[in-house]
Image (cartoon, rainbow, N blue to C red):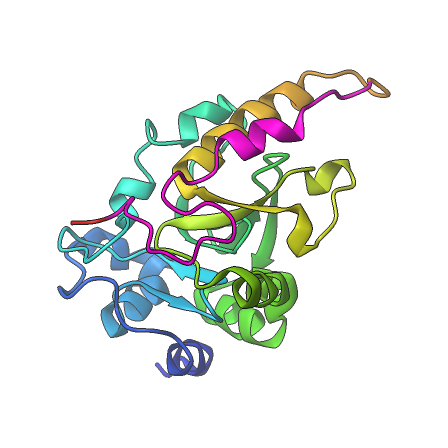
Amino acid sequence: MEFRGIGELLAIAGDALSDAPPKNDALFGGTARQLGALLSARNGFYALESALHVFPAGDAVLSGRSLGEWNYRQLWVESYGELVPPALFFAEDVFGGQFALIDEAVCLFDPETAKMAVFANSVEEWASRVLAQSDYATGYSIAHAWQVENGALPVGHRLIPRVPFSCGGDFSVENMVLIEAVSAMRYWGGFATMIAGLPDGAQLRFSPAVVDGLRCAGRPRGDRGECGCFDR
């Protein structure tokens, strides 16, 4: 079977994040077979100026986290309580929005609200849509603008809005803070569970300074030095 969308995505992607082939044979069965084909061709990668991050499967990960580590419930999923359905989170956009396999579909998980919506009906369709709608699907334009001003995004980090998008925060470089991805997802887990329990019409109070406190200590805003969070 030819996977044109996957091939076109790989053509603009960076180097593999793992130097070993994926080891989890179960990953390639059933509806996940296209994800297996993707990772067999390139085992994890960044694309679109790091706006898209696809996790590598297996143990020999060169930097960052593996697919297995990222889906370990205690890492960040449990911070959402019962808001997250069983899913295989395999990729993320620049804001930490998660692409996940659920049943027959690829879904997009909003980290701020824990809402899960169908994005594509297969990994092949997901790849094609990411390329066709790169700004909507990955936050590419913000990723590009932020990196022009601040330098390359370090491995394992995402851009998080000080004022949440769900609360009217701007899609702008000025509203973005560089945060290590797990810290960001744990923060959003607490935020999502808080707003899930609010009655309709309730006022939401939050402090943008909390997000600033989560910032990667190794890469403050404006510093073009290398981050050391994932030094091996």
Q: Position of residue 117 (x, y in %)?
A: 62, 47
The answer to whether residue 100 of the structure is visible from this angle is no
Residue 29 in view, yes or no: yes
Based on the picture, tell me whether residue 212 belongs to the magenta stretch: yes
Q: Main secondary structure of the magenta part?
A: loop
Who's the residue at 36% across and 56% down the image? 225
Residue 79, percent across and down?
Answer: 45, 24
Left or right: 34, with 59 as reference point: right
**Quick check: 169 left or right of 210?**
right
When the figure is inspected, residue 144 is found, relative to residue 162, above or below; the finding is below
The answer to whether 212 is drawn above or below residue 36 in the figure is above
Residue at figure coordinates x 23%, y 69% from the top left = 40
Query: On the rendered image, what quadrant is the N terminus found in?
Result: bottom left
- Residue nearest the observer in this picture, 82 or 51: 51
Q: Nearer the viewer, residue 230 or 44?
A: 230
x and y, in percent, of residue 21 in the image: 15, 65
User: In the picture, residue 45 is in which quadrant?
Assistant: bottom left
What's drawn in magenta, residue-wise?
203-230
Image position, residue 129 (x, y; %):
57, 71
Is residue 31 rendered to the left or right of residue 29?
Answer: right
Q: Tell me: 63 left or right of 31.
A: left
Q: Quadrant of residue 91?
A: bottom left
Report the front residue among 60 and 145: 145
**Residue displayed at 41% across by 25% down:** 78
The residue at the far right in this view is 201
Residue 144 vs 114, above or below: the answer is below
Relative to 110, is 124 above or below?
Answer: below
Q: Is residue 106 magenta?
A: no
